[in-house]
Image (cartoon, rainbow, N blue to C red):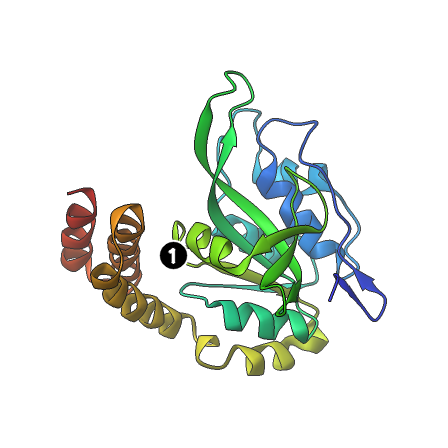
């Protein structure tokens, strides 16, 4: 799979040309697949209303789709590689948020940052996803293991857009993730296992993700304890 599904294509854009435009660019790419007409500056006017708005949250992307387009979109936590592949194989590109290391533009020092990317294909033989990466290049190959580790830094969150005639198909594919609250429970269960099976920075993310799931499930005392444990 390469990002072309029966005539629908994800149109790659670079995020260069505007400061920290990863979010607007990747949302524009995701929507382009469904025939939406626009680019990173179209989404950016809403998602980053002033020049130094430093971050775009996934829920802001959902709000944009619901309020500014005729399309629908869902955001879920606790995703898996198999779910990503299932969605892609059935014609639904997936936007994910992950943590990556890049050379910082001004200082050239290695720095960690959050980064969105749109996944449009995969190759099980090589164990790689095909990503439309707005910072690096189109059709970037990303190893399954690498993506999973990077994705853990953001609680395995993902966004899928859809045309209204594809809503039922998408929700059937989502299965247990069709219900948003249930996705929080899935994320909690996964993080609760990973806090004992992982070490180092991955264990930190697992504790933090556990706290995020508890917060989403309105267990605020439990979330506070998990966040404290993460920072220990």
Viewer-closest of 145 and 118: 145
Q: Residue furthest front?
A: 125
Between 35 and 85, which is closer to the camera in this rendering?
A: 85
Q: Residue at x 52, y 42 (%)?
A: 115
Whether 56 is drawn above or below 219: the answer is above
Q: Quadrant of residue 94?
A: bottom right
Return the x and y of residue 7 as percentages of the image width and height: 86, 66
Farthest residue to the top: give it.
Answer: 107
- Crowding near the residue tagged with mark 1, few <14, some 14–19, many ≥20 C-alpha atoms within 10 Å: many
Foreground residue, 70 or 204? 204
Residue at 28% across / 71% down in the picture? Answer: 189
- Measured as percent of width and height from the top left, residue 163 is found at 70, 69
Q: Establish if 119 lies above or below 53.
A: below
Label 1 SS: loop
Q: 129 above or below 90?
A: above
Number of on-image labels: 1
Q: Which residue is mark 1?
A: 155
Q: Is residue 215 left or right of 174 when viewed as pictured?
A: left
- Residue 107 x %, y %: 50, 16
Q: Position of residue 122 (x, y in %)?
A: 65, 65
In the image shown, does 201 or 57 lie closer to the viewer?
Answer: 201
Q: Quadrant of the N terminus?
A: bottom right
User: In screen coordinates, is 149 left or right of 39?
Assistant: left
The residue under the point 27% across, 63% down is 194
Tell me the quarter of the image containing the C terminus: top left
Residue at position x 74%, y 61% from top? 3
- From the viewer's perspective, is 41 left or right of 172? right
């Amino acid at each position: 799979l390469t990002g072309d599904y029966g005539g629908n294509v994800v149109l790659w854009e670079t995020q260069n040309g505007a400061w920290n435009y990863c979010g607007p660019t990747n949302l524009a790419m995701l929507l382009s697949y469904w025939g939406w007409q626009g680019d990173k500056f179209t989404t950016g006017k809403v998602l980053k209303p002033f020049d130094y708005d430093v971050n775009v949250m996934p829920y802001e992307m959902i709000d944009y789709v619901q309020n500014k387009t005729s399309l629908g979109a869902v955001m879920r936590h606790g995703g898996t590689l198999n779910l990503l592949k299932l969605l892609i194989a059935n014609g639904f590109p997936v936007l994910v948020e992950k943590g990556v290391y890049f050379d910082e533009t001004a200082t050239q020092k290695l720095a960690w940052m959050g980064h969105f990317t749109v996944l449009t294909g995969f190759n099980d033989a090589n164990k790689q996803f095909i990503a439309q990466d707005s910072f690096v290049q189109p059709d970037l190959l990303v190893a399954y293991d690498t993506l999973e580790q990077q994705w853990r830094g953001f609680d395995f969150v993902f966004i899928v857009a859809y045309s209204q005639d594809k809503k039922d198909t998408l929700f059937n594919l989502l299965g247990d993730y069709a219900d948003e609250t249930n996705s929080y429970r899935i994320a909690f269960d996964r993080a609760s296992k990973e806090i004992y099976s992982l070490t180092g920075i991955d264990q930190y993310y697992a504790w933090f993700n556990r706290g995020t799931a508890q917060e989403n499930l309105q267990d605020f005392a439990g979330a506070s304890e998990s966040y404290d444990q993460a920072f220990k």
